[in-house]
Amino acid sequence: MVGLTRVPGLLFGGDYNPEQWPEEVWAEDVRLMAEAGVNMATVAVFSWSRLEPGQGEYDFGWLDRVMDLLHAHGVAADLATATATPPPWLVRAHPEMLPVTADGVRLEFGSRQGYCPSSPVYKREIVRLATAMAERYRDHPALAMWHIGNEYADHTLECFCPESARHFRTWLEARHGSIDGLNAAWGTSCWGQHYTGFDQVEPPRTAPGPVNPAQVLDWRRFCSDALLELFEAEKAALRRVTPELKVTTNFMSILHGLDYWKWAAAEDIVSDDAYPDPADPSSHVGIALSYDLMRSLKQAPWLLLESSPSAVSWREVNAPKPPGMMRLHSLQALAHGSDGVMFFQWRQARYGPEKFHSAMLPHGGTETRGWQETLRLGADLGRLAEIAGTHATAEVALVLDWDSWWGLEAPESMPSNRLRLKDLLLSWYRPLHARGIAVDLAPPGRDLSGYKLVIAPNLYLGGEELLSYEGELVVGPFSGVVDVNDQVRDGGAPGPLRELLGVRVDEWWPLPDGTAQKTDLGTASTWAEWLRLDGAETLAHYRGGDLDGLPAITRKGRATYLSCLLDDVTPVLDEVLARAGVEGIEVPAGVEAVRRGDYLFLLNHTTTQQRIALPGAGADLLTQTAMSGEIQLAPRDAIVLKETR
Ligand code: GAL
C-alpha cells in the first residue's frame, strides 16, 4: 500500500477555506474532520491577499494556527502556494498585469485568476510568495504536498496585451528560428501576410476576417506553454527549499486549452477536478474517459483533488446529487485509479459566488443528508485503504494529441465546424466502456507496442507516429491531413498513413446538419469522405446519396480506416476487438465494470436493481462479504470485489 504522499491509505478531504470563518469555527471543523475520517485538506488556494495584505507584509499567523490544528487532528495539508489570485494592492500597483481579451478589453479585478500569464510582475511575485510559503512551512508536520496555482486556464487561458505579444514573439523565435522560418511555417504568402521582422507579429487578436490558422495553432501551443512556465517557476522555487516534497496542480478533466501530456510530465502527482453533471444520466461515461486520461498521463495512480458533494454553483441549473450518487461517483474515480477522493469544499460558504455550491459539511450542519453522506463515504474509504497505489492496465489505447485537437477545432477555416474531438473520442470510448474494457489514453509518440488494439479516433495533424505500431490499428476520419504547421500534405490525406491504410481521400464530404449518410455498417452523420482504394479492401460501402457504392470503411492488413463518423461504431468495434483478442466484462447497461489491480469495481449507475453474473469469486471490501455467481446490485450501489486468484 504505497500512497501518493506519506499519508497512508486513500486520501479523503477537501478544499478548506478557514479564512472565511471566525476562528471559533475552526475547532469544530477539525473535530468534524476527524469524525468523518478526513486525512487531507487543501488550504490557502486563494489566500494571497490574507497572507500578504501589503507588499512584503506577511501575515502567516492564522495559517500557522490552521496548519497546527490540522496536524493535531490527523489531517495533512495539500498546501497551496496561494498564487491563484493576485491581491488588489499588487493589481492596483501594476494594472498592466490584468488580462486583456482578443477584443482589447482589459478585465477588472473582482473575480479570481486576474493575471496575464506573461506578466513579468506576476511571475516575479509568485516566485517570491512560493518561496516565502516554502520557507515558512518547510518543516511543518502537516505539510504533505504542494498545490501550485489552481486550475490553470480555468478563467484565464490567454491574454492579448502587449506583454503577451512580446512573450509570444520570443516563443515564436525559439520555435521558428528566423522570420523566414515563421513565414514559411505560417504560409504568410496567403492573404499578403509576409512579415519582415518579429516586431510585426501579434497574437491572433480579433481581426477583420478569419485569422491565419497556423498563427492560431501556434498561439494555442504558446498559451499552454506560457501557463506551464508559471507552474515551472513556482515548482523551481519550491524545489529549492523543499526538494523532497511532491508537487501537483489540479487539472480540469479533459481540457482543450492545455496540453496535459506536457503538463503531467512537469508534475510529481497528477490530480484532477471532476464535475460530472448529476442531471445527465450518462455523465459517468464522459467522466470515466477523463479519469482514464488522468491515469494514463503518468501511467500511475492520480488524485481526484476536487469533486462536488452535491450541486455545483456554476451551471445554468445546478442539480443536486440524489442519495448515493456522491458515493458512487467517488468510488468510480477510485476504480479508474485515483488514490483518494477530495471535494470542493469542506464547509459550505456563507458568502461569495460559491455560497450555493455544496460542501462536505452543508449550511445545515451535521443534521443534514449531506453530512450523513460524507460520514458514509469516509467509512467506505477506510475499508478500501488497501487499493491505494494499485494500478490498472489496459489492452486498448485511444490516441489523443493536443496539436491535432487544436488544429481540428480551429475556428473559421475547416470543412465543417461540427467535427469535435471529444465527440470522436466518445464515439469509441462509450461502447468500450459499456463492454467493461479498460482503456488507456496515449499520445501518438508513446510506445504503443504493449497494446493489442490502438484506436486513433482522429489525428488531423501528424500521423507518422502510428507507422511503427504493429498491432491492430483503427484510424478515424480526417486524419493525416496536415503537418505540424497545419499545411496540407502533398497528395492529400491520409498523408503519411496513405500506404499503411491503403486509401486516398479525394474530397471531404461533411454532412449538413440534420442529414445522414447510410453505410453497410450503420449510419453516419456529421462527416463522410469520397475515398479511393489504393491497396485496401472495402469493409463497408456508402449506401445512397452522392457517395453511393464508394468505400466508407476499409482495411489493409491490420489497419482499419473509417472515413465517416458513425453514430454507432459497435459493429466495427466488435470485429476489431475479436481480431485483437480483447475481451471485456459482461454487465447490464448502466453498470460499469472496472478492474484496478486485483480489485473489480462494479458500479450501478442506474436507478433500478441489477442482476450481475460475477466473472469470478472474491470478497466485497465494502460489505466484507464473500461473493460469487450471480448477485443483485441495488440502485446506485457498488461492490469492490477483491478477486481470489
Ligand atoms: C473549481 C475550483 C474551485 C471551486 C470549484 C467549484 O473550478 O478550482 O476553487 O471554484 O471549481 O466547483
Image (cartoon, helix red, strand yellow):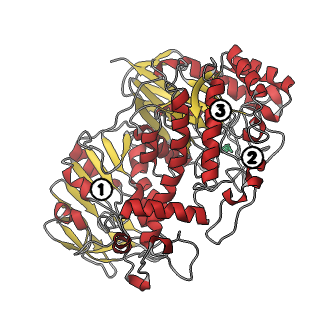
- Report the residue that reaches farthest toward the bottom: 192
Mark 1, residue position? 572
Query: Closer to the N terminus: mark 2 or mark 1?
Result: 2
Q: Which residue is at a point 49% across and 37% down the rendered structure image? A: 270
Q: Quadrant of ligand 1?
A: top right
Amino acid at dot 3:
Ala
Q: Is residue 409 visible?
A: no
Where is the N terminus found, in terms of image quarters? top left
Q: Is residue 564 visible?
A: yes
Where is the C terminus found, in terms of image quarters? top left
* Cα distance between the residues tagged 3 and 2: 16 Å
Mark 3, residue position? 132
Q: Which residue is at a point 78% across and 26% down the rendered structure image? A: 61
Q: Which dot, 3 or 2, sits closer to the camera?
A: 3
Mark 2, residue position? 87
Q: Secondary structure at mark 1?
A: helix
Query: Closer to the N terminus: mark 3 or mark 1?
Result: 3
Corner quadrant of residue 435: top left
Amino acid at dot 2:
Pro
Query: Closer to the N terminus: mark 3 or mark 2?
Result: 2
